[in-house]
Structure formats: C-alpha cells, structure tokens
Image: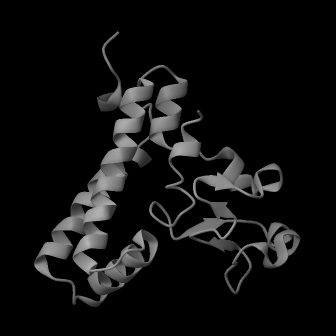
Amino acid sequence: MSLCLSCGLCCDGTMFEVAAITPEEAMRYGDRVNVSKDRRHLLLPCPALDGCKCTTYQDRPGVCSTFKCLALASLDEGLMSDAEAHEAIEEVLGRRRRVTALMGMTDDRQALAAARKQAVAGTASEELTAALAYLNRALLVMLLKPEDSFLRKEK
C-alpha cells in the first residue's frame, strides 16, 4: 500500500492550511475544491480527500502532484524504512488525537482548526498549548528535507 494512502496529512489540514494553485487550476476545479478569494490557494482540508484517497487524483493541482513529505522522500531514497515512515505518521496522528481529546471533540480536523484559533487568540489552555507544540514538532519531522544532514543515516 502506498504510504500516501495511509496518511493524507498534507491534504487534510494537519500539515498545511492552504496549498498554492494557479488561477487556471482554480477555474478548472470549480466547486470540487475550496479556493481563496484571490484564487491562488486551495483551502485545506481538501474536500476532494476521501479518507486518505484523493478523488481528483488524475486531475490534481501541480502542487499536489509534486509535494513529497520527508517520510515519503526518505522512503523513496532508502533513508527510512517503510516501518519508520509509518511510525512518523503515527506519531503525528497520535499527537493530533491528543489535541482532539483536549478540545472535547470527535472530529480531528475541526478540533485542530479550533485549537489553532485558540492558540492564535491566546486563549488556549497550557495543556492545549503544549499538545499543539508536540504536534508541531512531530509535523516538523514530516516537513524537513531528506537532504538535511542531521536526518541522514550512516551508511
């Protein structure tokens, strides 16, 4: 099974809140996705995401077809095993579930969005602030470039 089909973090609003698209792409997708007012950003979570599967995969935006998180890039380059890549994803998912629990909600995406709003407004509890910090650290590992020297394994 493809790593991406077990993840979806780049599309579900966990990693990013927006993804850059061209105005032409915004026109092409019409009401299948949500775009910013300036028609230069796809608003995430993407409504074309069904679980971890893109329902517009064959006609997805350029940014979606070229993006590779650290786990996928490292797996492709042999720097990370399949088990290690899945472990990195599970770490993020576990941290996101913690935020959801602290928010007293059941929908991870809605809880994360609400928690981030509280953090920006300065109204998040100390415990929620810490949970968001741990989630952000786990996400950082997913976003770093595989060529970063401290991520390379000794060969």
Question: From the viewer's perspective, is residue 134 above or below residue 41?
Answer: above
Across and down, in percent, residue 113 comes to 41, 78
Residue under the point 29% across and 86% down = 118
144 relative to 101 in the view: left or right: right
17 relative to 36 in the view: left or right: left
Across and down, in percent, residue 24 comes to 86, 69
Q: In which quarter of the image is residue 106?
A: bottom left
18 relative to 113 in the view: left or right: right
Across and down, in percent, residue 32 comes to 78, 73
Residue under the point 31% across and 84% down = 120
Residue under the point 42% across and 74% down = 107
Residue under the point 51% across and 71% down = 17
Q: Which residue lies furthest to the top in this view?
A: 155
143 relative to 27 in the view: left or right: left
Q: In which quarter of the image is the C terminus?
A: top left
Question: From the viewer's perspective, is residue 36 above or below residue 41?
Answer: below
Question: From the viewer's perspective, is residue 129 above or below residue 152?
Answer: below
Across and down, in percent, residue 10 comes to 53, 56
Q: In which quarter of the image is the N terminus?
A: top right
**Residue 10 visible within the image:** yes
Q: Quadrant of residue 135?
A: bottom left
